Image (spheres, rainbow, N blue to C red):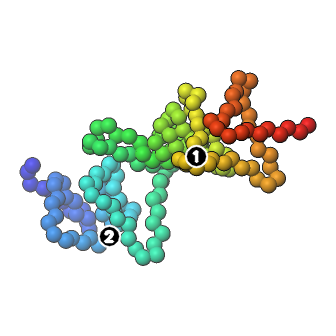
Amino acid sequence: NGTPTVTQDGEDTYLEGVLEVDGTSTFGGNVGIGITTPLTALDVTGSASLSANVSLRGSGTAHTFNILDNGSLNFQRSVGGDGGVATALFIQQGTGNVGIGDATPSSFLEVGDGTDSIQISSVGDITFVDANGAASITGPAGGAFSVVSGASQALTLTGAAASTWSLSSGALTVNTTS
């Protein structure tokens, strides 16, 4: 779409238009896209799109994603391009809560669909959230499911007045002491 315009201001050179680089190019210093004062080797202001992989390399390097200025991080997935994007992993701004399949996690870790979920608090408490009241915990197929309390802790099962405790087979033993 026309010829690019090149201007100079002191030691800075500005290119307005399309820059197409064929082959290998190196830049000594920081490169900015959408920003005139890049702070790092590559500083992009605005959205970016990749159609391939992102690789982090460096032997023994601790790779870090920094969310600056109290932003949030949202990994989304889509089987058909930009349409029908669904949240796969979300890190909430301010709280740091993590949602898997949920863009509004209300606990330290919440896995679900925004309606039914399992929540794990920052101290390890587990809560099941179920909109239709049919929450269940299922053991492995053909195996046993056990709920065990610590050596000095009581195991308490609490239900509402209309709660029903049942078994599909075997026996339920209840020992009560006063």
Upstream in sequence: badge 2 or badge 1: 2
The CA distance from mark 2 to mark 1 is: 57 Å
**Residue 176 in view here:** yes
| Amino acid found under the numbered disc labelled 2 | Gly
Looking at the rendered image, the quarter that the C terminus falls into is top right
Q: Quadrant of residue 160?
A: top right
Residue under the point 72% across and 49% down:
148
Q: Position of residue 2 (x, y in %)?
A: 8, 51
Q: Nearer the viewer, mark 2 or mark 1?
A: 1
Q: Say whether residue 54 is left or right of residue 171.
A: left
Residue under the point 29% across and 43% down:
79
- Mark 2 lies on residue: 29
Closer to the camera, 73 or 152?
A: 152
Closer to the camera, 46 or 75?
A: 75
Closer to the camera, 45 or 149?
A: 149
Residue at the top extreme, as displayed: 162
| Amino acid found under the numbered disc labelled 1 | Gly
Residue under the point 76% across and 44% down:
155
What kind of element bears circle 2? Answer: loop
- Mark 1 lies on residue: 139
Q: Which mark, by number, is residue 153?
A: none
Q: Say whether residue 58 is left or right of residue 33.
A: right
